[in-house]
Image (spheres, helix red, strand yellow):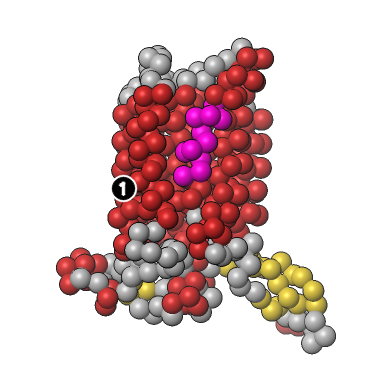
Amino acid sequence: MLIELFLVALVLCLAVLFYWGFRALPAERWQVIGCLLGDKGQDGAWQGLNLTYYGFFNATAYLFAAVLFFILMGSLSLSMTGVLAILAAILTICMPASRLIALWVEGKANTFTVGGASFAGLLAAPWVIQFINGTLGVRMGFQTPVLSVLAAIAVAYAVGEGIGRLACISFGCCYGKPLADCHPWLRRLFRGRAFIFSGKTKKIAYAHHLDGQEVVPVQALTTLLLTGAGLWGCYGFLKGYHAATFVGLLALTQSWRVLSEFLRADYRGTGRITAYQVMALLSIAYALLLLFLFPAAGDALPDLATGLRALWDPGVILFFQVLWVAAFLYTGRSRVTGATVRLHVVKEQV
């Protein structure tokens, strides 16, 4: 019963967040969360560095995914030192990869790609786990089951990317095609449900001038599909179906990436089939290969209560706080928008 209550609570919380996000975030006011003052000009105005809701929602997605991964690993009564080491190592790979792969595919230094980051993380994850088992694990007396960790990573990734798409809505990136250019049945399907972005600093405005137009709400579709799949995978993991959870989630999420690319209007590199679609298809094949290389270990059934209790540790809480701040600073400092700020005294309030 605890598993069902846990998942229902997550569904309710996320449903409220998504309902608000889909309605509010396309608006202009939900792009910049704050501004840090830089140099002061001769005219008395300050140059500002914009901090974005893109960074806020990305950091929150990183945090949510990491906490969920930690709970699932804790439910197996694994060494938390090993779990944190694996988590830190994979994040260290994925976060820079999100920018470097976007630079390679799209030729843009100031953008991020979740697809590229997830592909790099999947490639590295089993060997990172093996390395930590063979070094830190041998020294401290623990061994982490590879397939179970991969299943937990798949769950965390699906839910994390789902939540992270709210960042894309707020910044106006990863946007869908104009409804006017879509097949009639797509226009009928999304009539009244399309996104309309406002604000000239949204990427959809300065890259394709599609602000004010109805576009396919591809970010919302990704949010709902991946989050739903991730919660389904969480249930499967906690019931002990680790192999099925890993392969099933990878197949579903990466198949959607291939399909959703055809609904997007933002630049994704050259060619009819994008590099991200190729990465997604390779990910599915690689997941099947890993299933044979690292068969299920037949461990005891996970215990959710144990996983939840593992969170209540000062070191773990501090780790997650540092993670959120680092992710926000890494993804939330806007390099493609600027600000001019003037300060004044409100005499009526003196």
Q: Can you say whether 259 is above or below 171 in the image?
A: above
- In the image, farthest residue toward the right: 42
Residue at 35% over, 78% down: 213
- In the image, farthest residue toward the front: 271
- In the image, farthest residue toward the bottom: 43
Percent position of residue 176, x then y: 35, 67
The reply to whether residue 135 is in sight is yes
**Front-most of 299 and 89?**
89
What SS does tag 1 mark? Answer: helix
Percent position of residue 130, x then y: 54, 24
Image position of 44 (left or right of 104) = right
Image position of 8 (left or right of 198) = left
Residue at 47% over, 45% down: 118
Q: Can you say whether 348 is above or below 153 in the image?
A: below
Q: Amino acid at mark 1?
A: Ser
Residue at 50% over, 59% down: 105
Image position of 111 (left or right of 219) = right
Assess whether residue 35 is covered by the magenta stretch.
no
Percent position of residue 341, x then y: 70, 78
Occupied quadrant, residue 139: top right
Examine the residues drawn in magenta and state their main secondary structure: helix
Judging by the rendered image, the residue that carries numbered circle 1 is 255
Residue at 38% over, 43% down: 282
**Front-most of 258 and 45?**
258
Q: Quadrant of the C terminus?
A: bottom right
Numbered range of the magenta stretch: 119-129
Percent position of residue 41, x then y: 80, 82
